[in-house]
Amino acid sequence: MSVETHLRDRKGAAEAKGRILSSSSQFWRPEDFSLKSSTTHHLLARLVDEGELRRVQRGLYWRGLATPLGMSPPPVDRLVAELVPGSGVGPAGFAAANLLRLSTQVPRRQDFAVPTRAPTDVGSIHFVSRKNRIGRVKAGLKPLEVALLEVLSRWTDLVEESSADAERTLRRLLSEGILDAERLAAASVTEPEEVKARLNELLVAAGRRDLIPHVTRSQELVAS
């Protein structure tokens, strides 16, 4: 390596380090830098050792707040959005029921449903694949709406409240627009039959019978 090349690499590494150290609440990846691969990985590893970065997983780093216990971890919602960007991603299992205020259980492991192949788990975050439920992506579902569909698929296992109280809670979320009834109806086409049936019942209870034709099996449910 020539002296000129060596000096250029050192300057590039110093500039990259400055960018990282001046950042806050930000993810970093090796491809964010126009350095040689070996230089980039050496820089990132050194900053992790110095407590200036936190390694989340291979190829992904986080710069948060420095604490006596080390670099603070990224917020769960930020990490999930970084690993699985886009719509149709949201909590599953008891994490979904808790978010909707239908259960008081706070799971030690947080499940997230993703409309793709499930990424590798990170810490207490566990991903479950819903790659066949592409309606969630096409309808642009928000995390809370994904949580609802996940709860509807395991209603008796997850909901602690009485059916009447749970329905009242969900009706309020729909009436206030916190849950978007139109998006949910559009997404339902690729959901399991039991989810479609429960969603239809909820839409009727919420006064959104106009959306029933958008949900598969709607005609036989209306006729029954």
Image (cartoon, rainbow, N blue to C red):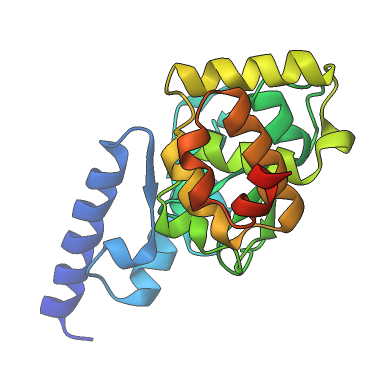
Q: Residue at x 71, y 33 (%)?
A: 95
Q: Name the spot of residue 161 as percent of width and height, x first.
A: 82, 17
Q: Is residue 215 visible?
A: yes
Query: Is 39 positioned to the left or the right of 106 in the image?
Result: left
Q: Name the spot of residue 126 as percent of width and height, x first.
A: 71, 51
Q: Is 80 or 31 nearer to us in this picture?
A: 80
Q: Give the quarter of the figure containing the N terminus.
A: bottom left
Q: Name the spot of residue 182 as percent of width and height, x first.
A: 42, 40
Q: Is 215 or 90 nearer to us in this picture?
A: 215
Q: Residue furthest front?
A: 223
Query: Is 56 positioned to the left or the right of 163 in the image?
Result: left
The answer to which quarter of the image holds residue 110 is: top right
Q: Residue at x 64, y 26 (%)?
A: 99
Q: Residue at x 46, y 23 (%)?
A: 178
Q: Residue furthest left?
A: 4
Q: Is 69 or 185 nearer to us in this picture?
A: 185
Q: Residue furthest bottom?
A: 1
Q: Name the spot of residue 94 as percent of width and height, x first.
A: 78, 34
Q: Is residue 80 visible?
A: no
| For residue 179, above or below residue 137 | above
Q: Residue at x 50, y 59 (%)?
A: 135
